[in-house]
Image (tube, grey):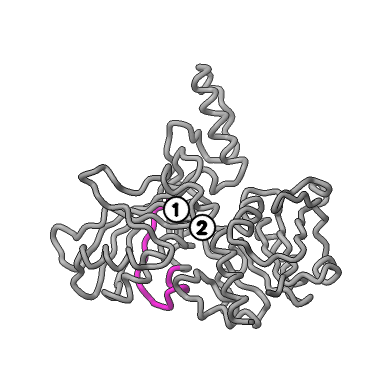
Amino acid sequence: MRKYNVAIVGATGAVGEELCRVLEDFNFPVGNLFPLASAKSVGMDVEFKRKIYKVLELTQDIFEDKEIDIAFFSAGGSVSAKFAPFAAEAGAVVIDNTSHFRMYNDVPLVVPECNAQDIVTWRNRGIIANPNCSTIQMVQVLKPLDDAFDIKRVDVSTYQAVSGAGKEGMKELVTQMQDFFAFKLDDSKVEKFQHRIALNVIPHIDVFGDNDYTKEEMKMVNETRKILHKDIEVSATCVRVPILRSHSEDITIHFNNPVDANKAREILKNSPSIVVADEPSKNEYPMPIISTDKDETYVGRIRKDIYQDNILHLWCCADQIRVGAATNAVRIAQKWIEIEG
């Protein structure tokens, strides 16, 4: 089996570290691994398959110098904007986890369970975009249901973990909870979020636009339509909650055809990367504590609307660092290898 030289840009961040774990868990055919980051992180240790790799400085020439085949980018949009083209020009396929390239018409935006066929257009720029974490878990659920019942509209409310804001987001929640138990919560620093996140929920992720939707909400709107290749109506409300890992979503789906909850449940049970946990009488339903550190999206509370026979309600949870970032990126790379042979 051929092995591939793999670079991870942003190797010391939360997603970069998870990429190493997922590559190992999936037994990905890595030849040489090159952890890359800014100059301040050079020399730091990254572990992969019980071997320690030193972080190298991200430069314009390193992708050609190291003969990189696959470059995962998870170091912020400005870094991808500057360095991803150099990686692509050097012959690597770039799998970009930032939002920078997602809505470029000539860059495929891919969730392999939904639109793996779009990967073939990667040669336009040498770049494949990884969608927003909340979008990924939602479209994994929407795609098989759309194929069966023809989706017209989606309304979603998210309950997003602090790890969506990286290591610093998790650190801020932990610190504030420590302050709470020390009776010092009123003095806790608020730096990563707009308000204190401990014992609170914040209906505000990213910045607000002129339409009063946030950029995070509009990502879900626009990315869903691009991935599904369908002009469906989507409305999102994105909320930050005091959970360390795993995003949850409450989704209401309007179909052009009548929907059957039992059939929908069976369809989802047989869909890739989905686990149905839906026995409310046994207190069985998706929760962040169940989906954390997993590579599947958990779906439950599947029920038909009380009043209209073309509306379905459900609840899903997924680890956004894995399913919503690292796992999806590695699955893209696996499909790329299948296509490029």
Measure the C-alpha gap from mark 2 to mark 1: 7 Å
Percent coordinates x, y for residue 153 in the rendering: 31, 68
- List the residue tagged with mark 1: 318
Residue 86 sits in quarter: bottom right
Query: Between disc 2 and disc 1, whose residue precedes?
Result: 1
Q: Which mark is residue 91?
A: none
Q: Is residue 282 left or right of residue 181?
A: left
Q: Residue at x 43, y 57 (%)?
A: 213
Percent coordinates x, y for residue 98 in the rendering: 61, 61
Q: Residue at x 58, y 61 (%)?
A: 26
Q: Is residue 62 left or right of residue 129?
A: right
- Amino acid at dot 1: Ala
- List the residue tagged with mark 2: 324
285 is within the stretch colored magenta:
no
> Is the N terminus in the top left, top right, bottom left or bottom right quadrant?
bottom right
Magenta-drawn segment? 224-238
Q: Callout 2 environment at 10 Å: few (<14), some (14 to 19), or many (20+)?
A: many
